[in-house]
């Protein structure tokens, strides 16, 4: 069994958590809490990337969640905290399950490539710098919500960075950095 987090593992855990028609975000955070901050960056990024990200308000909601998690990682907190209003925000089970069905086969193939490597890129001082980048990308997601699925660009970069932190995979961090550069460039073109 792997001792690090996989993208499919995060999706599966989210899928297992959502057993009612609607599930509060607080319940999802509690189910992912033992895996560290990485999955808590990946989960909202995935929600923004998947077709659920086309629903008005979802990218901004995901961006706020990422922002809160990344700022806490930057501050050196040991476990994440979310305010009550955000913990009570709910995700629809049917929408998530449809997106899960599409994403899981893709993530299963991607997980074969993920393993701990170049761990210096996910160590504490670098992880805090990556959290600064995640803050910037989360802020960028908000105005991109005006263009359908455009928030998926910074969301993808955050997903790679969060997964790299979770799996201690520096190669994913490098991919996330490249995706961040692409997302910023494309966003500048879209917004300006």
Image: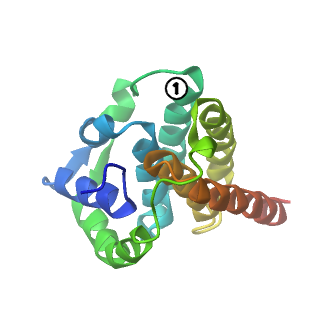
Other residues around mark 1 within 10 Å, as few (<14) / some (14–19) / many (≥20): some
Which residue is painted at 45% across and 59% down in the image? 115
Could you say which is closer to the camera, residue 108 or residue 20?
Answer: 108
Secondary-structure class at tag 1:
helix
Could you say which is closer to the camera, residue 19 or residue 76?
Answer: 76
Quadrant containing the C terminus in the rendered view? bottom right
Residue 173 in sight: yes
- Residue 42, image x and y in percent? 45, 51
Which residue is painted at 82% across and 59% down in the image? 188
Quarter-of-image position of residue 37: top left
- Position of residue 117 in the picture relative to residue 8 (left or right): right
Question: What is the number of callouts on the image?
Answer: 1
Could you say which is closer to the camera, residue 154 or residue 105?
Answer: 105
- Residue 79, image x and y in percent? 39, 25
Residue that mark 1 sits on: 72
Residue 145 in sight: no
173 is higher (above) or lower (below) than 189: above
- Position of residue 165 in the picture relative to residue 84 (left or right): right
């Amino acid at each position: 069994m792997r001792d690090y987090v996989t993208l499919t593992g995060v999706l599966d855990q989210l899928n297992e958590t959502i057993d009612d028609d609607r599930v509060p975000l607080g319940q999802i955070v509690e189910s992912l809490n033992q895996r560290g901050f990485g999955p808590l960056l990946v989960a909202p990024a995935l929600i923004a990337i998947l077709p659920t990200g086309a629903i008005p308000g979802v990218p901004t909601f995901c961006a706020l969640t990422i922002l809160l998690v990344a700022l806490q990682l930057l501050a050196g907190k040991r476990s994440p905290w979310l305010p009550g209003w955000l913990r009570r925000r709910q995700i629809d089970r049917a929408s998530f399950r449809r997106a899960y069905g599409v994403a899981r086969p893709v993530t299963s193939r991607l997980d074969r490539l993920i393993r701990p490597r170049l761990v210096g890129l996910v160590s504490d001082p670098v992880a805090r710098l990556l959290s600064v980048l995640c803050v910037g990308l989360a802020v960028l997601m908000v105005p991109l919500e005006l263009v359908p699925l455009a928030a998926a660009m910074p969301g993808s970069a955050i997903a790679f960075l969060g997964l790299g932190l979770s799996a201690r995979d520096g190669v994913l961090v490098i991919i996330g950095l490249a995706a961040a550069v692409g997302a910023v460039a494309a966003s500048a073109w879209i917004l300006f």
